[in-house]
Image: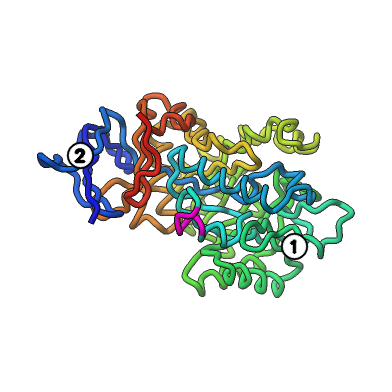
């Protein structure tokens, strides 16, 4: 048995309660007590630092950790793509993220090697490849590339961005294939996107009946569907089909938010990627992406306000893509500017855990929870920019194991 106490810190437990001075006992991989460490106990001294639950990013793309054009243009070796993925996973852990939900890009092998401890990284929940309609959002083949060659961009066990479906039958086959390859939930693209090929933000993709096929297959396995969706038409289609969660939700209006509340559908806004994509030159994107990104941040902020006022569960996801994902905590900084640092922390911990279906084990500091925690060098609840700086995460603990410790 391995047992130690975290002492001399202030605990913000992830529920929104006021931080308190309390010691935390860890036994093997579990938090087993909160109180005062007894004399002679093995301790890790926090030196007055704020201790929070390990952060959760509900929208990551580890499998898109290389320059996008190069990765999908057959310009990179599998070895380089793998190196970028594993570097990105380690960066997420070092930034204080102990759990991530990968919403498209990695194949099951990445999840397994991190789980086995062969590669440093957070706990990963993965949908495997995104489900997209033929030629819809999620397809990045060249204009002259036959669509049936798209899956040749996949590297089995490593990365697989998307599977395309032309009808409900193909979609059913593809989601079953995703589950066979280790997916624990499903993601569908039901509108166009900012980084797109032949689609637009106001396009709707997949019909209610097609989305319902994925929901049926997920329900049969005791899991759920989340959807990439920007416009209200696509969001309403997805809600009526039975999905659990909406990613982005850029143009959510009051009517759509009320429909989501009626069906208990959560929202994951993604502000960090909007900031990232605004620098289209650095991202290697064309002028069409610049046109698409215009006004998205303001509309997403409005959607966040409407969702909060309507009483939706609102989680947190960064959606960062490409090689510049080290500052994953930018999402908390951006959210804190629109809300408060504490509300950003709660969204990134206990609320995200509930949405992802893992709220019984992670997302809070409390007895019986897995020992996933971060000690911050300076208080991020006073200045949320500290969430965005990986150097501020002085101690990172995952499953009771010390993954990072700096003086």
Image location (x, y in percent) of residue 69: 76, 44
Q: Is residue 385 above or below residue 131?
A: above
Q: How is the image coloured?
A: rainbow
Give the residue displayed 52% in from the left and 54% down from the top: 260
Checking the image for residue 151, the label placed there is 1
Q: Which residues are magenta?
A: 113-118
- In the figure, is residue 22 to the left or right of 232? left
Numbered label tally: 2
Query: Which image quadrant: the N terminus?
Result: bottom left
Q: Which residue is mark 2?
A: 23
Farthest residue, direction left: 39
Magenta residue check for 141: no
Farthest residue, direction right: 144
Q: Is residue 229 above or below residue 171?
A: above
Question: Could you say whether the residue bearing mark 2 is in a helix, strand or loop?
Answer: strand
Give the residue displayed 38% in from the left and 32% down from the top: 406
Image location (x, y in percent) of residue 103: 58, 53
- Frontmost residue, 395 versus 35: 395
Question: What is the C-alpha distance between the residues marked 1 and 2?
Answer: 51 Å
**Residue 259 visible, this orientation:** no
Query: Which image quadrant: the C terminus?
Result: top left
- Residue 165 lies in what quarter of the image? bottom right
Image location (x, y in percent) of residue 395: 36, 37
């Amino acid at each position: 048995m391995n047992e130690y106490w975290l002492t001399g810190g202030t605990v913000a437990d992830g529920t929104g309660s006021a931080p308190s001075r309390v010691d935390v006992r860890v036994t093997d991989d579990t938090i087993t007590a909160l109180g005062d460490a007894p004399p002679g106990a093995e301790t890790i001294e926090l030196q007055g630092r704020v201790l929070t639950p390990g952060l959760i990013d509900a929208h990551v793309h580890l499998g898109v950790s290389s320059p996008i054009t190069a990765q999908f243009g057959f310009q990179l070796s599998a070895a380089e793509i793998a190196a970028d993925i594993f570097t990105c996973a380690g960066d997420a852990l070092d930034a204080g993220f102990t759990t991530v939900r990968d919403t498209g890009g990695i194949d099951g092998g990445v999840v397994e090697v991190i789980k086995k401890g062969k590669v440093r990284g957070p706990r990963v929940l993965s949908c495997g490849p995104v489900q997209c309609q033929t030629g819809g959002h999620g397809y990045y083949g060249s204009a002259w590339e036959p669509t049936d060659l798209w899956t040749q961009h996949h590297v089995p066990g490593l990365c697989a961005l998307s599977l395309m479906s032309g009808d409900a039958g193909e979609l059913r086959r593809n989601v079953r294939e995703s589950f066979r390859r280790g997916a624990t939930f499903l993601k569908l693209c039901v509108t166009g996107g900012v980084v797109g090929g032949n689609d637009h933000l106001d396009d709707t993709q997949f019909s209610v009946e097609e989305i319902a096929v994925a929901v049926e297959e997920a329900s049969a396995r005791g899991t759920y569907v989340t959807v990439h969706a920007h416009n209200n038409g696509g969001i309403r289609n997805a809600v009526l089909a039975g999905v659990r969660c909406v990613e982005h939700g850029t143009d959510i209006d009051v009517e759509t938010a009320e429909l989501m509340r009626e069906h208990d559908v959560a929202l994951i806004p993604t502000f960090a990627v909007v900031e990232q994509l605004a620098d289209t030159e650095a991202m290697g994107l064309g002028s069409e992406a610049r046109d698409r990104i215009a006004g998205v941040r303001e509309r997403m902020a409005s959607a966040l306000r409407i969702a909060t006022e309507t009483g939706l569960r609102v989680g947190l996801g960064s959606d960062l893509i490409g090689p510049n994902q080290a500052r994953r905590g930018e999402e908390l900084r951006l959210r804190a500017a629109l809300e408060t640092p504490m509300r950003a922390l709660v969204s990134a911990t206990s609320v995200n855990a509930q949405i992802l279906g893992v709220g019984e084990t992670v997302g809070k500091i409390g007895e019986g929870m897995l020992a996933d925690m971060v000690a911050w060098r300076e208080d991020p609840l006073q200045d949320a920019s500290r969430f965005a700086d990986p150097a501020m995460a002085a101690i990172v603990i995952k499953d009771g194991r010390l993954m990072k410790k700096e003086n």
